[in-house]
Amino acid sequence: MEVALGLILLYGLSDLLFRHLGLLSYARGSRREPKVALTFDDGPSERTEALLALLRQHGVKATFFLTGERAHARPELVARIREEGHQVEDHGLWHAPWRLLLPWLEWRHMAAGRGRYYRPPHGLHTPFTRLFARLLGKRVALWDTEGKDWLDLPAEDLAERLLFYLRPGSIVLLHDGPERTLRLLEITLPRMLTLGYRPVTLDELKPLPLSPRLALIRGLQGLEERYNRRHGVRRAGLGPFHLFRLEKKPFPGPALPGLPPGTPAFELHLESERAMELSTPEVIRAFRNSLKEVAKALLEDPQVRLIYGMSPLAPVAELFGFKTAPLPPWPRWVAGLAGAFFLWLYRGELPRRGRVWAQLTYLEREEVLQRYPPSTPASPPPAPGAPESPPP
């Protein structure tokens, strides 16, 4: 009994650390450039040719994680994928996760392929997966954005979700097989390109192994998605460096002239992961551009009279025209500690002295529209750090 319980705990801990958190896996690229890697598992299939045609239509290269048995059955499709300039990697010999629970079968499953990157079926990890990968000279590749194309949901809904959570450096999990994947890509690919994203192969993305801090960020993504869904949070702009999510709530701050208590407002949630690798001037530029997207959201909802946030960085917000007000003790402590944690999590920094406790920052509707009038650029803005980027 003790041995069985120990094995269950060992397998569970391995899956938690290496699949859910993705510790030391290659699951994302740099957040500084709007490159993303589209990856397709489980192929080749009867829809591979249609998938290749769609990628060719948009001039996009992708990475295919092929299953050994299917690749051996359709060598002409494997050759076609390579001929069209796509990257081919290893998804193991079978797509039968139960076999991975037996070490000798997992070794056979992993040793059969010749790819430099290996993606386990469903991302499943046993206590032996990383050891076998090291012995075989393979890198374990996971993902940080899911297309959810295995769910029986309208492709339009899946497309909106994918564009919501797509970030610079994302590795996107998709599948070669479901019919809805084609429809999902028909919707999202042109929009990705219009927004300024550039789909590339895994090699061109140059993914990074996840440190403990980056693995924790990956592990918290599910909590963020549940919060967004529960509270009706929306993004202000879907571009790679649009930094705000909006939650419509009653304004919690002081009474203001002409604004009764409980006036509808947008609470700003900072998309910290999009800004985590940007320099200070690049963050300032992205912040200003993002406030123009907030102004667009205000025009779409005349009820909303203010925007606000609670942060230890309130003095920085003053540079953008925000006013500040004190918070009651309990919200000040909670928001301050949360702000300090996220500063460490996303920037690897500790708060400076005097910037631990949070303050309320707010800006009224009319001033937002005056300072940050919405604009629609003729083309996507250049990536941060690009030579043609205008000064902040």
Image (cartoon, rainbow, N blue to C red):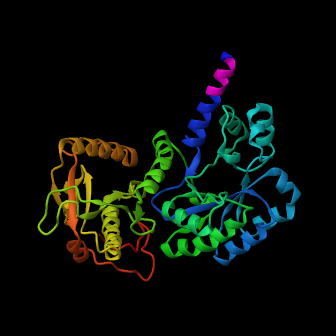
Left or right for 192, reference 54: left
Inspect this view and state whether residue 252 appears: yes
Left or right for 385, reference 266: right
Q: Position of residue 52 (x, y in %)?
A: 73, 70
Q: From the image, which quarter does the C terminus lie in?
A: bottom left
Q: Position of residue 214 (x, y in %)?
A: 48, 45
Identified at 75% across, 37% down, the residue is 100
The magenta region covers 3-9
* Residue furthest bottom in the image: 378
Residue 107's quadrant in the figure?
Answer: top right
Q: 230 and 2: which one is in front? A: 230
* Residue furthest top in the image: 2
Identified at 58% across, 64% down, the residue is 158
Q: 224 and 73: which one is in front? A: 224
> In the image, is residue 182 above or below residue 18?
below
Q: 194 and 162: which one is in front? A: 162
State yes or no: residue 108 in magenta: no
Inspect this view and state whether residue 352 appears: no
* Residue furthest right in the image: 73
> In the image, is residue 214 above or below residue 53?
above
- Chief secondary structure of the magenta span? helix
Q: Position of residue 346 (x, y in %)?
A: 39, 48
Q: 267 and 143: which one is in front? A: 267
Q: Position of residue 365 (x, y in %)?
A: 23, 71
Q: From the image, which quarter does the N terminus lie in?
A: top right
